[in-house]
Image (cartoon, rainbow, N blue to C red):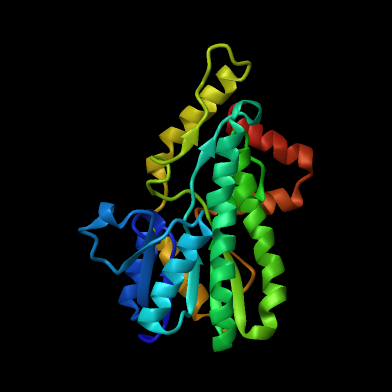
Amino acid sequence: MKHKTVLITGGSSGIGKSIGEYLVTKGYSVYGTTRSLNKHNSFVAFPLLEMDVRETDSVQKAIKELLQKEKHLDVLINNAGVGITGPLEETPHEEILGAFDTNFNGPLHLIKAVLPQMRKQEKGLIINITSIAGYMGLPYRGIYSATKGALELLTEALRMEVKDFGVHVANLAPGDFVTNIAAGRYHSPVLDSSPYKKPYGSTLQQINEGVNDGEDPILVAKAVYKIISAKKPKAHYKVGTFTQKFSLVLKALLPDKVFEKMLLKHYKL
């Protein structure tokens, strides 16, 4: 176990840090990534590599540095992500593209960077951290849902493409967990002149009030360890409260109109 090397994007805080700290206790050689090493001089949980997942050159440089240190890479955990909220009509398109750059293009850059090494090793595991929100279009979180939903589908396709190389791919969708994602989230301003002012304002307030009510990220870390320990990882895993996971069951079973009414009632729209 101690010879297995794990790379976690966005590993300096939140879910990524929790995953890394937990895997260290299990004997893994863990590396995390951060966009700026200078901001984490006191970070000692595990080594950090400087990487901007949005930039292919930055990704390639960090992977090269890691392989020079460890000579192999066993597990990639695509965890880095950003939040975004707002009415679709009023969300600046550059912010939409930015969210996709981090949440979808970022993991894709990493996947392309590590696959040659994993093919050479004839083994490897890629875990994409998405979100339960990626299974449904949530009001005023549609862009975030779309970025995570796209990564879900990418996972399904990639599994079939790399199965003959000894590389496994899995997706882990967390519900609401206590992280710092809200601090870096882009949210469209609630405009007095906006026709969405009242419903978006109340939804945004509800989202903000629930930021600190999430579950402990250690549950995500334990779910990741379960996936790594599996001989044949499944395509999809979920972690969260019973209600969050059961919502996916309801979405699959209920007529669209009924499920939509449930969401509208939940968000008081």
The reply, left or right, for residue 76 in relation to residue 263 is: left
Q: Is residue 202 above or below residue 113?
A: above
**Numbered-mark total:** 0
Q: Position of residue 50 (x, y in %)?
A: 37, 61
Q: Which corner quadrant of the image does residue 17 belong to?
A: bottom left
Q: Position of residue 39 (x, y in %)?
A: 27, 52
Q: Position of residue 202 (x, y in %)?
A: 52, 24
Between 187 and 117, the residue placed more toward the observer is: 117
Between 189 and 217, the residue placed more toward the observer is: 189
Q: Quadrant of the C terminus?
A: top right
Look at the image and tell me whether residue 29 can be seen: yes
Q: Is residue 193 above or below residue 146?
A: above
Residue at 36 percent of width and 70 percent of height: 31
Residue at 42 percent of width and 79 percent of height: 67
Residue at 42 percent of width and 33 percent of height: 209
Q: Position of residue 177 (x, y in %)?
A: 43, 50
Look at the image and tell me whether residue 131 can be seen: no
Q: Which corner quadrant of the image does residue 151 belong to?
A: bottom right
Q: Is residue 27 above or below residue 61?
A: below
Residue at 56 percent of width and 18 percent of height: 198
Q: Hey, which residue is sitting farthest top in the picture?
A: 193
Q: Quadrant of the N terminus?
A: bottom left
